Image (cartoon, rainbow, N blue to C red):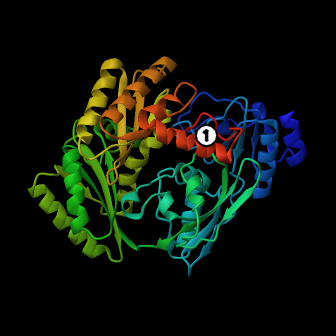
Amino acid sequence: MTLDALLSALGPQVVQPGHAADRSYLTDWALREAVAPLAVLRPSSTREVAQALEICLAHEVPVVPQGGRTGMVGGAAPLADGVVICLDRMDATPEIDVAARTARVQAGVTLSALQRAAQAQGLMFPVDLGARNACQIGGMISTNVRGMRAFRDGAMRENVLGIEAVLPDGLVLNAMNGTFKNNMGYDLKQLFIGAEGTLGVVTGAVLQLRPVSPARVTALLRVRDLTDAQSVLEVLQSRLRGLSICEVMWPDYYHFACGFRGFDPLPVNGCADGLTLLIEAEGVEETPMRVALQAALELLFDKEWITDGAISQTSRQTEEFWALREAHEGIPQAFASVASFNVSLPVEGGDAAISGLIAALGEAFPPLRCLWFGHLGDMKLQLGVVNVSGSPIGAEDVIRIKDIVLSGVQEAGGSLVVEQGGETVDYVPRRIRSEAEHALNRSLRRVFDPKGIMNPGRLF
């Protein structure tokens, strides 16, 4: 039996039978119904990951790699006939090279642990997420997360210099040289960034760091619509040096966030209409940035592109502003279930696309509410569809919701990643990708994983 072979090779400190594993390994932040796999593996070294994959390949057992399980689209959900490989024990203290401005990390290191280690040396890792205390570097690489500074500093793909990964047959790919420029041959590490664990298991990385900016200014702004929001962003980018973050929250999400956190920094106009922007600039001195921000806001008020706003005056107020943007962690707690989507929309037509989706979903399912929020700079948005009646969303309704969202996003010229279980793994790529592109991706996947054991049912 596979479980016996794993226990014999790795021992009970690594191998937990699925039925006896902690429930946290059996689901994700979307709090789907827990699924007990054959086993949950928690290796502490690359060698143990390689041993585990060799055994799983020999027995043709599906493998689901897991990071911090902070995703809400099912990419790390266990399979009943497979095993889970969770990297949370591979969390050695990051090695910071101050001169090279790099960090060597194991895949199980959390983002917040990396941030603390870098900050202690006067450096920072530019990719930041609200789930920083739980998300792990390996998962961030495997999903190519973008984060809040992506429009300025890029996504994970632009900040990963080297990777260590284990292939399905146990072969260890060590591409950890960490050089900024390597033009010789194929850049293999790029294949694993965004691969969702379908080519192998990422076990380590060399990451690019940047100097810490000692000062920052933060503000909440209210705008009428997405068109005005983009105009605001353009003005701020031209007039506010160091603008690093511009997040956007639609009314239903902002209203939820205020209720979840228990405060509303912009109560005058309420939450009935208009989008709320969270902007932040980083630099060397705070005073010049505040002066520049105030001048920019006066211009924006004159042009009537913003209708309300507040500049943070204290560190506590800054924390409150951020608490609203990061209130999405409370969505699974507040609602019986959530259908989650990561959406990329073009700037032109974005207002119409989102309004159309809200209307279509509201007409099809009156108790549903759409919680939209995300990154304004690159229009990478998140949508949580929730049932405000207190009941969970039924399985058939989830399929209909996916169809409505897929259709709306495709018509707008955007793209998305949805939960890709049995009924959608073939359906989604046909809707989002050309058949030629889909076929090439499947061929590439077979080169690395000819028996198809790595995270089956996801991506391609």
Q: Which quarter of the rendering shows the N terminus?
A: top right
**Quarter-wise, where is residue 289 in the image?**
bottom left
User: For the view shown, which residue lies furthest in the front direction?
Assistant: 436
| Crowd class of label 1 (few under 14; some 14 to 19; many from 20; radius 10 Å) | many
Q: Is residue 131 left or right of residue 413?
A: right
Q: SS for tag 1?
A: loop
The residue positioned 24% from the left and 57% from the top of the image is 233
The residue positioned 42% from the left and 36% from the top of the image is 432
Give coordinates of residue 265: x percent, y percent.
Answer: 29, 49
Q: Looking at the image, can residue 188 be seen? A: yes
The residue positioned 88% from the left and 47% from the top of the image is 9
Residue situated in front as seen by the camera: 130 or 407? 407
Give coordinates of residue 26: x percent, y percent.
Answer: 66, 35
- Residue type of the residue flagged with mark 1: Ala
> Relative to 157, is 390 above or below?
above
User: For the view shown, which residue lies furthest in the right direction?
Assistant: 8
Residue situated in front as seen by the camera: 99 or 197? 197
Residue situated in front as seen by the camera: 293 or 264? 293
> Relative to 360, is 24 above or below?
below
Q: Which residue is mark 1?
A: 76
Q: Which quarter of the rendering shows the C terminus?
A: top right
Q: Looking at the image, can residue 262 be seen? A: no
Residue situated in front as seen by the camera: 442 or 348? 442
Give coordinates of residue 198: x percent, y percent.
Answer: 62, 44
